[in-house]
Image: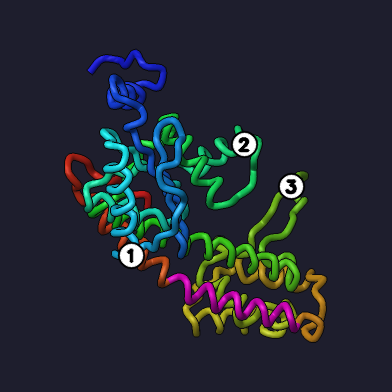
Amino acid sequence: MGKSSHIQGRKGTKFSQQLRGVNLEQVLIVAIDAAKLHQKALICNYFGDIIEKPFFFSANNSGMELLCKKINQAVTATEAVRLFLGIEATGHYYEDIVREMAKRGYHVQILNPYTTFEERAGALNWCKTDDLDLVAIAHAIKSNKATENQLLNGVQRQLHVLTRARRSETRKRASLRTEIRALMDLIWREYQGYADYSAGRARKIKVFSDFWGKASLFFMEHYPHPAAVLKLGETGLRKLSIQHNLKLRNTTIQKLLHVAEQALSRNLQELRPELMLLKMKLRDLRTLMPKLMFWNKRSRTFSFRQTDDCFLPSRA
């Protein structure tokens, strides 16, 4: 197919073909504003003449029947030959309406929320009310500003849900880790690494090769204060390593004792609130990790399942 000669490309060509040679008074625009509870719709013709004033309907069977009834009445009253329906992509609330209307034979165009914002801004009106939103949606439909996005279905939709869940858990983990690092800075500043200037330049030396590894997490949970590590001593640390299979190297033990000796930490009594919070955050992190592993596994299960003529690549 060659390039379109329309300023809006193929999308504009398709829209103009639907309108060319048609009496614009017989072109109806149905603007729908989705919400959690109270959906609202407006029906007007291409010139903006209101055919059906804004009305509420519910996102259930009776609500969908009411919306279809209003549309059919407007079509009959105006002898409409073209019908354009549009809805703003508000969270996930619009999805049920788009899907149910498709089952009833209506194609609902999806509008980016920023498009309706621009329509309100163009009218120098930034108020956020249902009726103004409906007018903005109607203007956007009339100007052919709807996206060509469609609702996902089948394996694509399932992968989308799983990916979102995985991303949510990943963000929680990142947030928890940031909080834990901040708490360890308050409790034992050099636990995460200390400065070394012996080679004639400044460099950071980590105590543990992996801050989120088994050994590091064990000490944060059971021996987060330098005084507790000093009390164990080298012999105690070796015994602890064997007992809990921490696999502490000699260099790690020496670095741990070094930062404990050099620590400027407050005493345990003063750090009680921070230590309590640290224990809670570590417990939350331990609870979160199996969930994240589960979502990673489920995402990979769907990653290369074939849908129609394409494969969905893994992002895990």
Q: CA distance from mark 2 to mark 3?
A: 61 Å
Residue neighbourhood size for the residue with mark 1, other residues' Cα within 10 Å, grouped as few (<14), some (14–19), many (≥20): few
Residue type at mark 1 is Asn
The circle on residue 121 is 2
| Residue 252 image offset from top left, x and y in percent | 60, 67
Question: Label 3 is placed on what type of residue?
Answer: Ala
Residue at position x 82%, y 77% in the image:
266
First of labels 1, 2 by sequence position: 1
The residue tagged 3 is: 199
Residue range (magenta): 272-289
> What kind of element bears circle 1?
loop
- The answer to which of marks 1 and 3 sits earlier in the sequence is 1
**Which is the main secondary structure of the residues drawn in magenta?**
helix
Q: Position of residue 193 (x, y in %)?
A: 68, 60
The residue located at (66%, 63%) in the rendering is 192
- Whether residue 10 appears in this view of the structure is no
Residue 167 place in picture, x, y as percent: 45, 58
Please name the residue that numbered disc 1 is placed on: 60
